Image (cartoon, coloured by chain):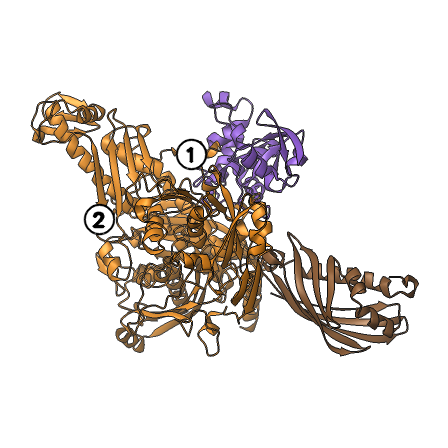
């Protein structure tokens, strides 16, 4: 391992600009002549718009434009799309209601976009928005998922008269039912996966700009995948063809999924820029973010696990209702289906699984991928079921898991996935050791003496990352392929630029990708620049989500680097007057085997560009190579997280006393960065388990729309974490990487709830387990104990 | 419009502002010092922390005019030329940032904690004192480590000790 | 989100006076906190504009108010809805009943309202307190208005 190569905890190259206040986020950008947009949003959950009069707003001095859904229609601007087709059990396609960027006759959730006011200043735009007269006729709000599909519920989209987007299933129902019929023990659980708001600290923002001379648009936006944004804006929404639309995602302050999607505001800014002939800027405030960023999770699930007389798992049966909100967001349809059900096998050898999912419209903000996307929901089901099953049959939860672990690889699960490699017992053993499982009994007694309740919870998770083999996702309904691209440019002086379709919004690509180059080319990371986030610079890419940048994005870079080295060998052969077959490349030098003749990478680069030695030959000048990498399989990071809590039954406060994470991410490029990803993921998972919950009241008002009411994890809510790993390199990509970005958020929630229920002695605790909820559960525990 | 004069990062600035202009707006929009961020509208995230007369304030809820005559330091004014402030260096060394959005506020708050609580800070104190700053990326683990190390490095003579 | 409030106030005036003042737009306009205009469309219908501040949300509400179930001089029901533009909306009603008591007249009220938009998102936790304060202010003003000593009001 060199000190900047693969495996080194290199300090991040990007940090200097951030710690000195020189990061450049979208809202930091100011374009000449820039105007400001303010969106008038619906205060009603469900209403028809009978009259919309913007004349007074338009007449306000300083206002340069007021636009509505009618204007969109007149310009032929298409609606927002959902890019993954899901078919119901009966083969019918999902029911996607129209999703105009500005409402056309009807609003469907509080925060839905009614009109946009564009003015010289934001203050003028806001004041003018007050003058827009809207005549709403309110309709009955549909908020509760169970009521949504019932008789008499108001209809949100005419295409879905029962408010069902789809009624989907996966797995073998007959085999599963048969296994249940002969089961010795069946564990049943009803679970709520609480609704979350992603809350990257940088809110969304956009600046649309139009260059009349070239009839071309530029959109600066907070995006995790600028190329996908451009594709959707041009091919589906029809703003401009791709060669006339440049999308730039500069520094982005966190995404966690919520910045994958193509939203109304960005679309409107770029379209409006041409209408008003000036750049149009919009920056979300935090309450707007709560209202209109796609939310996450929000499942109601009934799950059952069948066991034989020895405690071997026979089958699993799951029924889930997934809230998709008022409209289908960009990838929402696949989250509770193909990103969820295929993970229900967890780390376990379960012969039969059957899962049914109903996707449901409600008058709430759209729900889409949030860190983990489907996989945290699946892991919560599996790991709660497994824990409760162990408790019910009186087996140690660690031993019960170990007994049911998959041991032989590759392993085909009954729900699509073919796991390639793993060693689940190794992670569990290490975790038991690090948490001092043997000492748990003593620690429980110590807590009891202080009047406290102590509990320990496991979560043995698996996730499918490295999204994804294009053919596989295509056959499942995806509208795109999920490969990645890279271009490596060797410059004449020997420095290197890497153009990547991945996007960094906190992941540290400028460092880890440079480490790969340093490792392969033997040059310093300071001689490497990573270029990303601009569709005019990078040819095409699918962006960053699903922990794919390492496994897929870096694999593309590795492929391009291989081509650069191969080309370098040809150039070196001419320069060193040797045959190409005799050229070796090692530690940054091209040398002729068995001689002391060699050239450094930089010298070969120069030769490649001056082309003096091979002019007129078949070899082309230059040292620039591109590659597309399409993965052959998903990758399967896995691991065991253990959470130990101490609860004060008097106050209901849950203190996380210790946390052990043992993850298997395959090959790790930069352990410092990977650990940071794990920490952040755990914090979001703990947030879900203990603190966070988006709540709509019965009338469809979002009553958790600021940090006053939506409880974000803060420093004093969390412990320090013990993070360790085991390694089984991923066989399906050239680097052996599996991915690490979502593991913590996937693993954490069931670990916390398993710990709390262990401490309390009953299973009736829902997320978020706030002090109030835990206090009530502790009261119930005391009543149960008294009754015994 | 009201005239306000203050010293920002050592330079005197005078501007005509709408009296309702917030300090955060003032530094970001008028002075184009965009290192100070705005992450919420209810004064709860701390992304906007700057120092006014040596004390941390949330610039999103401070009126620019109330800082008339004050000395304001933003993240851009913390380093001494090319030489990072010890707290900045500690955040890099301990990977106390990911997306970097909360970072300026975190660093400014951390320096203030050291000014108030001294150079030896335990984990518990740091976590409690960071209550007003939200980070969505790091899980705080490495921020806590960075603040602890940064605090030590800020002690007079710390560089000399480290060099020994 | 729903908001409910009820209470009573004892006013130093006979029931007929209280009833008359309750139907007098000028008096109501003077007494409703933040009320900027109250125009009669008919004896039982007003168009009102009021400025209201709930925590971080301040807004000018424009709305219609109707008086229903008139039972002079015993009480009525007020029904109304107001749009506060970007701040959201409020709609609902109040039952008002008058009773003779030795000190004058007791007014008993029972309010049920729905609020939405920014008011609910940011002011939700404050709305009950603000409503109570506004009610107190109203009755403070109203008590002065009905007091025969201030006959000029
Ligand atoms: S922006 Fe100042 S506290 Fe959030
Ligand atoms: S580093 Fe992203 S919010 Fe803290």
- Residue A333 left/right relative to C114: left
Does residue B7 lie above or below A95 as drawn? Answer: above
Residue B37: where, in percent of width, then height?
52, 40
Q: Which of A354 and A86 is in front in this view?
A: A86
In the image, are marks 2 and 1 on the same chain? Answer: yes
Residue tagged 1: A15
Does residue B74 lie above or below A752 as drawn? Answer: above
Chain represented in purple: B
Does residue A599 lie above or below C121 as drawn? Answer: above
Chain represented in brown: C
The chain containing the residue under callout 1 comes to A
Q: Nearer the viewer, residue A699 or A168?
A: A699
The chain containing the residue under callout 2 comes to A
Q: Quadrant of the N terminus of chain A?
A: top left
Residue A68: where, in percent of width, then height?
48, 57
Does residue B17 lie above or below A67 as drawn? Answer: above
Chain A takes which shade in the image?
orange
Label 2–label 1 contact, CB within 8 A? no
- Residue A606 left/right relative to C88: left
Name the residue located 29 percent from the left edge and 50 percent from the top edge.
A466
Name the residue located 64 percent from the left edge and 51 percent from the top edge.
C56
The CB of the residue at mark 1 lies under 8 Å from ligand 2: no
The CB of the residue at mark 2 lies under 8 Å from ligand 2: no
- Residue B151 left/right relative to C77: left
**Label 2 to label 1: alpha-carbon separation:** 32 Å
Quadrant in the picture for residue A554: top left
Residue tagged 2: A731
Residue A611: where, in percent of width, then height?
15, 25
Q: From where the camera sits, is residue A665 visible? A: no
Q: Nearer the viewer, residue C64 or B45?
A: C64
Q: Element at badge 1? A: helix
């Amino acid at each position: 391992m060199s000190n900047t190569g693969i495996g080194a905890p290199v300090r991040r190259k990007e940090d200097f600009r951030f710690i000195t206040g020189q990061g450049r986020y979208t809202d930091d950008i100011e374009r000449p002549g820039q105007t400001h947009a303010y969106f008038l949003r619906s205060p009603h959950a469900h209403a028809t718009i009978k009259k919309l009069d913007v004349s007074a707003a338009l007449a306000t001095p300083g206002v340069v434009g007021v636009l509505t859904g009618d204007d969109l229609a007149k310009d032929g601007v298409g609606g927002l799309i959902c890019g993954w087709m899901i078919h119901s059990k009966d083969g019918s396609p999902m029911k996607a209601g129209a999703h105009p960027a500005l409402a056309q006759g009807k609003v469907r959730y509080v925060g839905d976009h009614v009109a946009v006011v564009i003015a010289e200043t934001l203050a003028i735009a806001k004041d003018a928005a007050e003058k827009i007269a809207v005549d709403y006729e309110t309709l009955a709000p549909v908020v509760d998922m169970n009521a949504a599909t019932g008789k008499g519920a108001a209809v949100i989209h005419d295409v879905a008269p029962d408010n069902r987007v789809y009624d989907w299933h996966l797995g073998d129902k007959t085999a599963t039912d048969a296994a249940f019929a002969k089961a010795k023990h069946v564990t049943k659980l009803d679970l709520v996966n609480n609704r979350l708001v992603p809350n990257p600290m940088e809110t969304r923002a956009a600046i649309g700009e139009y260059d009349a001379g070239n009839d071309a648009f530029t959109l600066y936006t907070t995006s995790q995948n600028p190329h996908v944004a451009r594709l959707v804006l041009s091919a589906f929404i029809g703003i401009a063809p791709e060669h006339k639309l440049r999308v730039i995602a500069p520094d982005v302050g966190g995404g966690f999924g919520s910045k994958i999607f193509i939203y109304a505001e960005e679309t409107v800014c770029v379209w409006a820029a041409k209408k008003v002939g000036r750049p149009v800027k919009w920056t979300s405030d935090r309450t707007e973010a709560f209202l209109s960023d796609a939310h996450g999770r929000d499942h109601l699930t009934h799950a059952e696990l069948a066991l034989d007389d020895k405690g071997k798992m026979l089958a699993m049966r799951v029924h889930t209702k997934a809230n998709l909100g008022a409209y289908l967001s960009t990838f929402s349809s696949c989250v509770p289906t193909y990103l969820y059900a295929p993970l229900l096998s967890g780390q376990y050898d379960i012969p039969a699984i059957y899962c049914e999912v109903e996707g449901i419209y409600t008058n709430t903000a759209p729900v889409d991928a949030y860190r983990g996307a489907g996989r945290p929901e699946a892991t919560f089901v599996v790991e709660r079921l497994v824990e409760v099953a162990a408790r019910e049959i009186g087996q140690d939860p660690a031993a019960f898991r170990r007994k049911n672990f998959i041991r032989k690889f590759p392993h085909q699960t009954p729900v699509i996935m073919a796991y390639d490699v793993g060693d689940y017992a190794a992670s569990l053993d290490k975790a038991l050791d690090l948490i001092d499982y043997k000492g748990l009994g003593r620690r429980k007694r110590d807590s009891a003496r202080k009047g406290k309740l102590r509990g320990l919870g496991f979560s043995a998770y698996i996730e499918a990352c490295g999204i994804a083999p294009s053919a596989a996702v295509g056959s499942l309904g995806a509208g795109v392929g999920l490969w990645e691209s890279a271009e490596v440019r060797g410059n004449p002086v020997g420095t290197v630029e890497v153009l990547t379709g991945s996007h960094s919004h906190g992941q540290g690509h400028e460092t880890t990708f440079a480490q790969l180059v340093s490792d392969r080319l033997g040059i310093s990371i300071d001689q490497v620049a990573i270029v990303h986030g601009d569709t005019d610079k990078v040819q095409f890419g699918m962006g960053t989500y699903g922990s794919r940048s390492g496994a897929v994005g870096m694999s593309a870079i590795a492929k391009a680097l291989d081509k650069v080295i191969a080309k370098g060998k040809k150039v070196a052969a001419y320069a060193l007057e040797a045959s190409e077959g005799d050229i070796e490349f090692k530690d940054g030098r091209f040398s002729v085997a068995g001689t002391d003749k060699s050239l450094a990478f930089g010298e070969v680069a120069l030769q490649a560009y001056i082309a003096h030695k091979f002019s007129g030959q078949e070899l082309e000048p230059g040292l620039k190579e591109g590659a597309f990498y399409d993965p052959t399989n998903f990758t399967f990071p896995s691991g065991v997280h253990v959470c130990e809590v101490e609860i004060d039954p008097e106050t209901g406060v849950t203190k996380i006393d210790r946390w052990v994470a043992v993850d298997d991410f395959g090959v790790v490029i930069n352990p410092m960065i990977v650990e940071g990803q794990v920490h952040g993921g755990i914090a979001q998972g703990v947030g879900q388990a203990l603190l966070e919950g988006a709540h709509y009241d019965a009338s469809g008002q979002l009553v958790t729309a600021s940090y006053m009411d939506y409880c974000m994890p803060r420093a004093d809510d969390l412990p320090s974490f013990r993070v360790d790993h085991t390694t089984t390199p991923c066989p399906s990509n050239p680097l052996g990487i599996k991915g690490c970005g979502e593991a913590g958020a996937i693993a954490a929630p069931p670990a916390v709830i398993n710990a709390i229920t262990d401490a309390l002695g009953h299973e009736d605790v829902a997320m978020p387990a706030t002090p109030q909820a835990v206090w009530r559960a502790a009261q119930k525990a005391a009543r149960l104990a008294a009754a015994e | 419009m009201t005239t306000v004069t203050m010293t920002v990062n050592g330079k005197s600035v005078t501007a005509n502002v709408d009296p309702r202009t917030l300090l955060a707006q003032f530094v970001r929009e008028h002075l184009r010092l965009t290192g100070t961020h705005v992450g919420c509208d209810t004064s709860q995230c701390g992304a906007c922390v700057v120092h006014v007369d040596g004390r941390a304030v949330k610039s999103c809820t401070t009126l620019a005019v109330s800082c008339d005559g004050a000395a304001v330091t933003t993240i851009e004014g913390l380093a001494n030329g090319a030489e990072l402030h010890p707290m900045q260096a500690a955040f890099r060394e301990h990977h106390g940032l990911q997306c970097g959005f909360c970072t300026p506020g975190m660093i400014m708050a951390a320096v203030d904690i050291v000014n108030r609580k001294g150079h030896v800070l335990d984990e518990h104190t740091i976590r409690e004192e960071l209550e007003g700053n939200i980070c969505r990326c790091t899980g705080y683990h490495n921020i806590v480590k960075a603040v602890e190390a940064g605090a030590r490095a800020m002690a007079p003579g710390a560089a000399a000790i480290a060099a020994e | 989100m729903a908001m409910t409030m009820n209470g009573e106030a004892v006013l130093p005036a006979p029931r007929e006076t209280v009833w008359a003042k309750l139907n007098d737009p000028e008096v109501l306009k003077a007494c409703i906190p933040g009320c900027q205009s109250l125009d009669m469309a008919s004896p039982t219908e007003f168009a009102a504009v009021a400025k209201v501040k709930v925590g971080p949300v301040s807004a000018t509400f424009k709305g219609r108010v109707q008086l229903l179930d008139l039972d002079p001089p015993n009480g009525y029901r007020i029904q109304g809805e107001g749009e506060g533009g970007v701040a959201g909306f409020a709609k609902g009603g109040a039952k008002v009943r008058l009773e003779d008591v030795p000190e004058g007249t007791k007014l008993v009220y029972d309010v049920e309202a729905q609020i939405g938009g920014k008011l609910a998102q940011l002011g939700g936790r404050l709305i009950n307190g603000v409503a109570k304060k506004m009610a107190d202010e109203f009755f403070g003003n109203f008590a002065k208005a009905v007091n025969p000593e201030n006959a000029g009001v």
